[in-house]
Image (tube, rainbow, N blue to C red):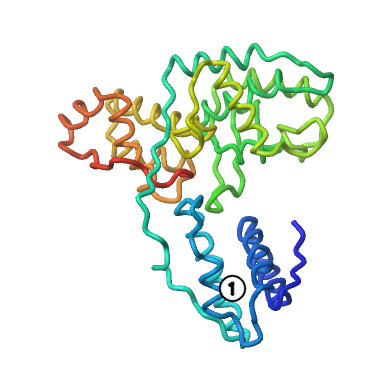
């Protein structure tokens, strides 16, 4: 991303960004929002510093925003304000309570076993319609990896060839969301698909090449994979209500993996207090509470789980109507 700022605070924004990256932070989304702020600031008089008027205009909730979108803006503008104050520039610090209260809720779509079978059948029947097209090679691998390993799509697309250890059946996820890294086991079926993919797409390679390299070089965009996934769902007859109306979305493969994993733990008699920390670390969640939200979803997808857990542990499944954070 171009780190050129042209507004009144351009020099300080550039310095702030340099310091954040020097600390090893990715700061990609924050950098994008800093550019949004920089552009907006050009419409305001900033000679007396960062005004309350400008700050509130930056964080004011738009009709199409989710709650997390406003939270991100409040977070970055507070960081900018603190930075400016520390450098002798008067700046209004936005209160965290500025988040607009909404009735927004998020509930992930959980794929049934039959739907997953249909998806696998559809991706395995992909055909190459151009010489450079790799859909027939790419999607049988990446969809299985998302579903079978519970990866975020960004984690899959950021994989380098050196991160996919087929000999030891391991995937290395480096510095992902929440700055977490982890090593995940992969089963023989996914190893087989990955090995076939590697031979076809990377007969010669450097270890730092992207595993899922696009035909034009570099990695695929998340949006490209998501849009093709929509086509796959249509082919399978799985209705899509839109991203804001229940999906299904690509990220729901990860949700489905987590719920199925939790179900298997419970059905095998493993205490949920033992299962949740294991799944939390495997998924790379920021906290155990993010994983615990799946208890309600698991009970809804598999009603027999509720009876089994309550007979062993009492009424421990939380009374949550929905999950509000779509990216855990």
* Percent position of residue 281, x then y: 45, 43
Q: In terms of depth relative to the viewer, which is nearer, 261 or 52? A: 52
Quadrant in the picture for residue 5: bottom right
* Percent position of residue 181, x then y: 56, 47
Q: Is residue 140 above or below residue 105?
A: above
Q: Is residue 324 above or below residue 303?
A: below
Tell me which residue sits at (53%, 76%) in the image: 53
Classify residue 193 as left or right of residue 255. right
Picture mark count: 1
Quadrant in the picture for residue 26: bottom right
Classify residue 252 as left or right of residue 126. left
Tell me which residue sits at (62%, 61%) in the image: 33
Q: Secondary structure at mark 1?
A: helix
* Percent position of residue 231, x then y: 61, 23
Classify residue 130 as left or right of residue 309. right
Tell me which residue sits at (60%, 34%) in the image: 171
**Within-10-Å neighbours for mark 1: few <14, some 14–19, many 20+:** many
* Quadrant containing the N terminus in the rendered view: bottom right
Q: In terms of depth relative to the viewer, which is nearer, 324 or 19? A: 324
Quadrant in the picture for residue 137: top right
Q: Is residue 81 above or below residue 72?
A: below
Residue tagged 1: 80
Q: In terms of depth relative to the viewer, which is nearer, 328 or 96? A: 96
Q: Is residue 274 above or below residue 101?
A: above
* Percent position of residue 216, x then y: 82, 34
Tell me which residue sits at (42%, 68%) in the image: 96
Classify residue 105 as left or right of residue 85. left
């Amino acid at each position: 991303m171009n780190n050129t700022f042209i507004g009144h605070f351009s020099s300080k924004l550039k310095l702030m960004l340099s310091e954040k990256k020097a600390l090893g932070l990715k700061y990609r989304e924050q950098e994008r929002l800093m550019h949004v702020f920089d552009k907006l600031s050009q419409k305001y008089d900033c000679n007396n510093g960062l005004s309350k008027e400008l700050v509130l205009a930056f964080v004011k909730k738009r009709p199409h925003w989710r709650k997390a979108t406003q939270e991100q803006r409040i977070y970055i503008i507070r960081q900018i304000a603190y930075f400016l104050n520390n450098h002798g520039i008067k700046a209004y610090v936005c209160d965290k309570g500025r988040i607009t209260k909404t009735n927004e809720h998020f509930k992930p779509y959980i794929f049934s076993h039959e739907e997953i079978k249909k998806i696998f059948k559809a991706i395995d029947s992909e055909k190459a319609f151009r010489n450079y097209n790799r859909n027939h090679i790419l999607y049988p691998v990446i969809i299985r990896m998302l579903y079978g390993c519970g990866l975020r799509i960004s984690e899959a697309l950021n994989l380098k060839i050196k991160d996919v250890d087929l000999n030891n059946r391991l995937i290395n996820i480096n510095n992902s969301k929440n700055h977490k890294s982890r090593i995940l086991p992969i089963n023989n079926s996914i190893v087989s698909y990955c090995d076939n993919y590697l031979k076809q797409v990377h007969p010669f390679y450097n270890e730092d090449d992207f595993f899922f390299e696009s035909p034009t070089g570099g990695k695929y965009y998340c949006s490209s994979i998501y849009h093709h996934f929509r086509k796959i769902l249509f082919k399978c007859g799985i209705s899509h209500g839109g991203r804001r109306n229940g999906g299904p979305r690509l990220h729901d493969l990860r949700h489905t993996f987590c719920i199925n994993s939790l179900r298997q733990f419970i059905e095998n008699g493993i205490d949920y207090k033992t299962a949740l920390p294991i799944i939390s670390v495997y998924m790379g969640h920021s906290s155990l509470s993010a994983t615990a939200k799946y208890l309600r979803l698991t009970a809804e997808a598999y009603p027999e789980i509720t009876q089994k857990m309550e007979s062993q542990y009492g009424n421990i499944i939380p009374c949550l109507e929905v999950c509000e954070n779509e990216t855990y």
